[in-house]
């Protein structure tokens, strides 16, 4: 039983495996060229078109190097227009709402690719886009790979050598493609490439002992990264400083890709109000707790792992026993998870995590004291989302979203859980942890303004970073790794920095609307379960399904079947 309002069987199937066997995710389709062939009616036509589109999005790979040349990108943009023409020809007006929601998801992702071509153009503006490894923050070139710890299995050596040998050509092409690089993005790429040089150097050193055949490829990759780094250092001072998309473009992206019913000006007002609320509640809590000792920090990995296990078990038990949300058996503490290590912290020149606990970054400052708020964010938040998505076989919703279309829903749900556990009473006997919860909330709100001002080209990365550091109430200082990580990500991926708070605001707004719609029939566990069962999609679409109200979506669709979409141009 899940409360007063029962879930349909289709929703329950997403939360609970059948006979203990996980539902299998749909396999990616084989590539099919876009054509102007007639489109049959019905939802299956949409599914077929979507599969073709998903296969079309990645760039062609030539000798292990993705092709981001001007000719290749022009051809992709032309092909995108054909896909959008075919989508426009599909009439979904008489479909059930869930199928119409799928249509809007496909449209949002196609508009996301359009925004990449018309506005963002990372292949020609963003040197950090050419991260050959997965060590960089934010969007990166297709084919970026992980650097494994050696030794590896014998059958993994040759594929890793192929990837390493492709690095010099990838970075050679990057220099040719980067015809409009921006100063802030070049400076971020310089930091990234310094780490890559160190990582490739360490890989070559370790390969001498374990896999000598990898030494030469690792050194070639290192030398290519060092040459690219030197090139960037030579040009960055002469480049235009700002790298945002511009306010008009940003508002277009919010409305047409993220399907968000707010402008950037409205988001700034909401963000500032939430910041003020978090600071005020923190000061009240601090006064209430005056005289109490500070929470001690764990100082070893053993202490950290034991503390996290206790926190995870108590958190999941609280959510289950309190009937707040259905937690399937597959959501559980993972003893192998360990601390989350930022990409920059994988630099072999850095000290170990527990060598100086007082010097760790902002999030570890909170988690090393009491991790419950962040575990709410990451276990019934992101981990639950990922585990549920792996069991979602729906051909459109079951796919991982492109172009951050699901970003506000995913970050909004995870952040919502942080304050929910406080309001629900889990932290009643943990007064200093309540302070941590408000500090985290203030920090999330303090990220809104930096993203908006960077994307409007009013602030540089350094100005945005300084604002975040200055306005975070505790445990953040100049050079903090989280501040560095956040501001780079929010410059390079529009919508990410605002996503936590605005996603949470949208979720709370939907909760209020649905509860007033149902009256005494409202059940919060059923609400949470229905919200989750909808899948990883914009909350405006979940609202349409849950309430039947399509006023927001009608405005966001903007008569797509009768006219094309056009993003604003320029900075």
Image (cartoon, rainbow, N blue to C red):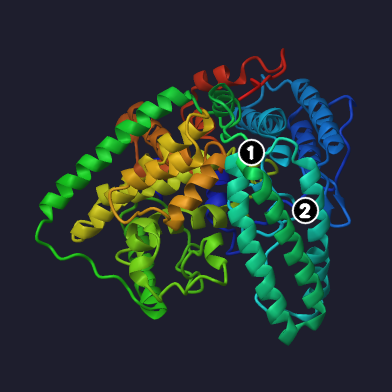
Task: Identify the residue at image location x=26%, y=47%.
Answer: 423
Residue in the picture at 89% in, 37% down? 33
How many other residues sit within 10 Å of disc 2, few (<14), some (14-19) or many (≥20)? many
SS class of the residue under badge 2?
Answer: helix
Q: Is residue 159 above or below residue 282?
A: below
Q: Earlier in the sequence, mark 2 or mark 1?
A: 2
- Image coordinates of residue 320 in percent, x first then y, are 36, 58
Q: Looking at this view, is 509 or 284 the one in front? A: 284
Q: Position of residue 53 (x, y in %)?
A: 78, 37
| Picture coordinates of residue 501, whole percent (x, y) | 40, 39
Location of residue 42 with respect to 9 vertically, above or below: above
| Alpha carbon distance from label 2 to label 1 | 21 Å
Q: Is residue 566 above or below residue 512?
A: above
Query: Marks 2 and 1: CB-CB under 8 Å?
Result: no
Query: What residue is drawn where x is 78% and y is 41%?
Result: 177
Q: Is residue 323 left or right of residue 190?
A: left
Residue in the foreground of this view, choosing between 519 and 54: 54
Q: Quadrant of the C terminus?
A: top right
Disc nearest the viewer among 2 and 1: 1
Is 559 situated above or below 317?
A: above
Which label belongs to residue 238?
Answer: 1
Q: Residue furthest top?
A: 562
């Amino acid at each position: 039983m899940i409360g007063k309002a029962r879930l349909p069987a289709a929703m329950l199937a997403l939360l609970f495996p059948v006979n203990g066997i996980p539902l299998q995710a749909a396999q990616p389709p084989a590539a099919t060229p876009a054509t102007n062939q007639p489109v049959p009616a019905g939802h299956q036509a949409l599914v077929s078109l979507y599969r073709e589109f998903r296969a079309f999005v990645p760039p062609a790979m030539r000798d292990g190097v993705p092709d981001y040349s001007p000719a290749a990108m022009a051809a992709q943009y032309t092909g995108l227009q054909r896909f959008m023409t075919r989508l426009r020809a599909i009439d979904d007006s008489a479909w059930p709402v869930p199928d119409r929601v799928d249509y809007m998801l496909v449209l949002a992702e196609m508009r996301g690719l359009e925004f990449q071509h018309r506005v963002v153009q990372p292949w020609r503006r963003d040197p950090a886009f050419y991260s050959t490894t997965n060590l960089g923050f934010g969007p990166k070139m297709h084919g970026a790979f992980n650097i494994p710890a050696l030794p590896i299995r014998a059958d993994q050596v040759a594929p890793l050598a192929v990837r390493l040998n492709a690095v010099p050509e990838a970075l050679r092409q990057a220099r040719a493609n980067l015809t409009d690089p921006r100063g802030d993005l070049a400076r971020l790429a310089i930091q990234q490439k310094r780490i890559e040089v160190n990582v490739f150097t360490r890989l070559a050193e370790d390969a001498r002992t374990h896999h000598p055949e990898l030494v030469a490829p690792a050194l070639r990759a290192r030398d290519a990264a060092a040459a690219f780094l030197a090139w960037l250092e030579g040009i960055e001072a002469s480049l235009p400083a700002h790298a945002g998309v511009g306010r008009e473009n940003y508002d277009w992206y919010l409305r047409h890709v993220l399907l968000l019913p707010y402008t950037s000006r409205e988001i700034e007002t909401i963000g500032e109000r939430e910041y003020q609320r978090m600071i005020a509640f923190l000061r009240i809590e601090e006064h209430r707790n005056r005289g109490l000792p500070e929470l001690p920090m764990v100082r070893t990995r053993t202490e950290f792992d034991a503390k996290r296990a206790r926190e995870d078990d108590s958190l999941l038990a609280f959510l289950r026993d309190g009937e707040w949300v259905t937690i399937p058996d597959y959501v559980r503490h993972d003893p192998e998870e360990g601390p989350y290590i930022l990409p920059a912290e994988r630099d072999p020149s850095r000290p170990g995590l527990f060598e100086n606990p007082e010097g760790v970054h902002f999030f570890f400052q909170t988690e090393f004291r009491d991790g419950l708020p962040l575990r709410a964010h990451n276990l019934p938040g992101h981990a639950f989302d990922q585990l549920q998505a792996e069991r979602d076989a729906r051909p459109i919703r079951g796919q991982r979203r492109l172009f951050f279309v699901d970003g506000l829903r995913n970050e909004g749900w995870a952040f919502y859980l942080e304050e929910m556990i406080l309001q629900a009473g889990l932290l009643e006997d943990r007064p200093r942890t309540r302070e941590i919860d408000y500090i985290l909330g203030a920090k999330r709100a303090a990220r809104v303004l930096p993203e908006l001002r960077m994307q409007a080209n009013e602030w540089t990365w350094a100005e945005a970073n300084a604002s975040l550091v200055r306005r975070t109430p505790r445990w953040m200082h100049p050079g903090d790794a989280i501040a560095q990580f956040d501001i780079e990500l929010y410059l390079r991926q529009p919508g990410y920095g605002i996503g936590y708070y605005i996603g949470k605001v949208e979720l709370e707004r939907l909760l209020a609307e649905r509860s007033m719609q149902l009256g005494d029939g409202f059940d919060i566990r059923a609400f949470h379960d229905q919200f989750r069962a909808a899948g990883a999609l914009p909350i405006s679409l979940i609202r349409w399904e849950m309430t039947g109200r399509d006023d927001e979506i009608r405005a966001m669709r903007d008569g797509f079947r009768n006219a094309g979409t056009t993003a604003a141009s320029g900075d």
